[in-house]
Amino acid sequence: MILLHTYLEESRKRFPDKPALYDGEWYSYKDIDNAANRLARYFVDKGLRRGDRVAVLLHNGFEYVSAYYAVLKAGGVMVGLNTETTPETVAYVLENSGARFLLTDKPFRRYLKNIAETIHALDGLVLLRPMSLFPEADLFEHVQQNYPATPPDVRIISIDLAAIVYTSGSTGKPKGVMLTHLNIVTNTQSIIAYLHLTGDDRMLVVLPFYYIYGLSLLNTHFAVGGSLVIENRFAFPSVVVESMNAHQVTGFAGVPSTFAILMSKTHFKDTEFPALRYVTQAGGAMAPSLQKEVARAVHPARLFIMYGATEASARLSYLDPRFLEEKLGSIGKAIPNVDLYVADEEGRQKPTGETGEIVARGANIMQGYWKDPEETAKVLRHGLYFTGDLGRMDEEGFVYVVGRSKDMIKQGANRISAKEIEEKILEHDLVLEVAVIGVPDEILGEAIDACVTLKEHRENWEEELREFVKTVLPHFKQPRHYTLFESLPKNSSGKIMKTKIREMKGLT
């Protein structure tokens, strides 16, 4: 039986002194496993019981990784907190998850000071550095000094909960996705298989570990005895490019905005990466035009376009790089041990070429949303996970996403996919990013508004875009409005937040 923390333990047995994690300095598998064991012992000593939730509010680093495996070793459930958040959201997630412990650090005082009462009510608080606000807290360093480096004796089975991963909250309050060890382990093994990961692989990590895509980078590389380089300076994207070569990474992962920024704000496309073997993209649709640019920039490394969801422990499908040009815009086919197809509302597979909802089944699919049976019932039905994405399948079994079921704009009598318009607008070389939304219109009911950021400012930018769009979209799909943004609001994993755009425009 494989549990998530046995990945760390097995790699420690095989490669005890191998550099596993770079966070300003290299930490070996032995360093990380010892730190995790000590912290796990602390949790058990303080009364943590199997199934108890532990919240972690930290940036990526040695302490985060140690805490993740410590919680699992102690039989607990990991609740990673978004680091770009609000006091209200922290309080909500702590209360909603029923977390008994919190591990955090001084930089997050701004979130904690207004909810000190909530924090004081927890059974345990561990800080990396002292905070006068919480004099009773235990320090991570003291825990490391006072507890043994042997693993605690806690019985855990593969269907025990391993994590509650809260969605980004782009619509309404965050939902807690319940994932077991079996869910995540199953998905981890599938990812390792199609990426052909080995102990020689080294991944540069810019995605946060509380985000399911970021967490998959940790699990997959520790499972094979590979290594991770933590790079928390994406605000300075040129540093990321330098880091890739300085550490001779073989892999890099990002969401669409990651690559849009690297391609437009750095020398990424003019830089050679001799050690790079592969690049992965997920976390939303990347415009085909950008896919082609990135593939050219990283060649001979291979670009894997991937598709998934938090509810699927990360991954559902991937496009084999061999088919990137031939099947441009496709999310590929299901990963090993997953069924993925286009269905009607009852879950019946639709004929080739017809549009329906993309559904999936597999051992990686979540148990449901924490304390939310109503929302769970909407997406888990007929033995399937209904993704909320509209898609079609071609005659060779490749799947294409054509839009979100909730991201359709009804302009006049026409239902139009925002995604289709966004992809066409991104083909214009002036556009850096775009988000298409529907806005109220007295005549049409709803009109299309293209919210854009530009690579460079030109006085006649709107006229240029309008003329270009006329050549690539029929009249009824052309935006009536264009709004220029300095930058589009994103969550900390890089996804554009359309709800925030609507708020900024006074539409909610």
Image (spheres, grey):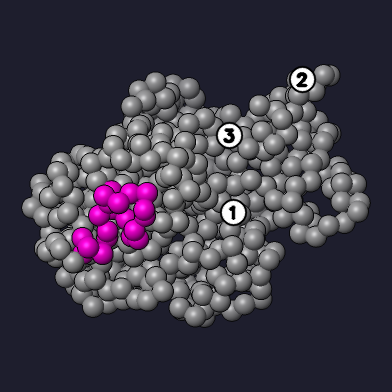
Amino acid found under the numbered disc labelled 3: Arg
Q: Residue tagged by mark 3?
A: 404
Tell us which disc is closer to us: 3 or 1: 1
Q: CA gap, disc 2 to disc 1?
A: 31 Å
Q: Is residue 160 left or right of residue 299?
A: left
Q: Residue tagged by mark 1?
A: 256
Res 303 seen here:
yes
Q: Quadrant of the C terminus?
A: top right
Q: Is residue 464 above or below residue 242?
A: above
Q: Compare residues 121 and 237 and report the one nearer the observer.
A: 121
Q: Which residues are magenta?
A: 125-144
SS state under label 2: strand
Residue 280 % position (x, y):
49, 60
Q: Residue 445, which numbered label?
A: 2
Quarter of image, res 259: bottom right
2 or 1: tag closer to the N-terminus:
1
Quarter of image, res 27: bottom left
Q: Dot 1 surroundings within 10 Å: few (below 14), some, or many (20 or more)? A: many
Q: Is residue 383 left or right of residue 251?
A: left
Instruction: Please name the residue shown 41% across and 74% down the image.
Output: 24
Residue 177 % position (x, y):
37, 37
Instruction: Please name the residue shown 25% across and 54% down the image.
Output: 138
2 or 3: tag closer to the N-terminus:
3
Q: Is residue 413 left or right of residue 222?
A: right
Contact? badges 2 and 3 (CB < 8 Å): no
